[in-house]
Amino acid sequence: TSENYTNPVYEKILFERKLLELDLLNDFAKQVMSSLEENFTLTDLENSIKILIRPFKKKGGENELIANGILSLALSNYEIQYSPDQGLSERIIFPHSPSEMNGIEDARFVEFTNENGERIYYATYTAFDGKVIFSQLLETKDFLNFKISTLNGPEVKNKGMALFPRKINGLYAMISRQDNENIFLMYSEHLHFWYTKQLILKPTYPWEFVQLGNCGSPIETEAGWLVLSHGVGAMREYSIGAFLLDRDDPSKVIGRLEEPLLTPNENEREGYVPNVVYSCGGVIHGDELIIPYAMSDHASSIAKVNLNELLKKLTGS
């Protein structure tokens, strides 16, 4: 393959905080970390563990488990480089870390604007190791160099986290669904760590009665934050809807659709996962909302929605 997995560099303070969140920062781990520079590579970490594990081996197998956990965390935070002469559609990210061995899916890309005007592209996605799902964060400025990071904290649960495209009141903001049913809003000072959540939407209408989730990052409009949603109804039918949140306080729901925008038609129902239409994000182009979506996990299509009509429906105007 033409991608290059580099020897990643880690920030010591950030890495220690992630170890603490994972309950891996015991005496052995502290000694490993104290032996490293403020910025260290995967090779540095591996060498330090090899040297320091010897005297700790006499104390039983716990520290070998800790060592494996430290390395697993490091391998789940990695970097990829692609050559500029490689076409954009050829830059395919394959599962790479131990947490991704059974697949990576549902990347929700967003163009994020920092307070200084700098633009970074982030994507939250789901990694699966065959037993447990993990929420990961991808970042790139040029779609040539990609940095993959773990997300940590007690509220990093389940699938479908979607980052807002800018900070709100000085904090990162994320749409989430920790309980596999309702939609929550989270804020954090640090992009990698999430500690609190607030319930903002529950399933209400028949098409979403089993569960609700987002279909990508919120889109900022003059009327508010437009969020595409997916709802699961009878016969496990997945449909795509929308709701609108207040721009200054996204915990306030301005409106939501009583009926879905998209439901699987007779040509879209058959597939690997039947009876499903699903999206990981839309984009505004002119006066239209463009929604790329998947049909029952076997093909993709694109839908166009008149933006003004949709916003009128959501605002009741």
Image: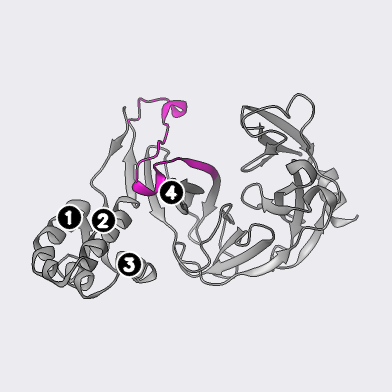
Image coordinates for residue 182, horizontal then vertical, percent:
69, 60
Query: In 3D space, how far apart are the residues under numbered discs 1 and 4 (Cα atoms)?
Result: 25 Å
Q: Is residue 74 left or right of residue 252?
A: left
Viewer-nearest of discs 3 and 4? 3
Q: Which mark is residue 139?
A: 4
What are the residue bounds of the magenta stretch?
83-107
Amino acid, disc 1? Glu
User: Residue under circle 1?
Assistant: 46
- Relative side of 2 to 39, left or right: right
Earlier in the chain: of badge 3 and badge 1, it is 3
Residue 225, image quadrant: bottom right
Distance (Cα) linking label 2 and label 1: 7 Å
Q: Earlier in the sequence, mark 3 or mark 4?
A: 3
Q: Is residue 104 magenta?
A: yes
Lower position in the chain sequence, tag 2 or tag 1: 1
Task: Assess whether mark 4 and mark 1 are in contact (beta carbons under 8 angstroms).
Answer: no
Q: Amino acid at mark 3?
A: Leu
Q: Compared with residue 54, is residue 71 higher up or lower down, i.e. above or below?
A: above
Q: Nearer the viewer, mark 2 or mark 4?
A: 2
Quick one: which residue is furthest to the front in this view?
A: 60
Q: Is residue 98 visible?
A: yes
Cα separation, mark 3 vs mark 4, equals 21 Å
241 relative to 12, above or below = above
Q: Which residue is mark 3?
A: 19
User: How dense is the environment of label 3, judged by Cα within 10 Å: few (below 14), some, or many (20 and up)?
Assistant: many
For this rendering, which residue is in front, 242 or 70? Answer: 70
SS at mark 1 in the image: helix
- Residue 220 visible within the image: no
Q: Which disc is residue 71 wearing?
A: 2
Q: Position of residue 256 (x, y in %)?
A: 81, 55
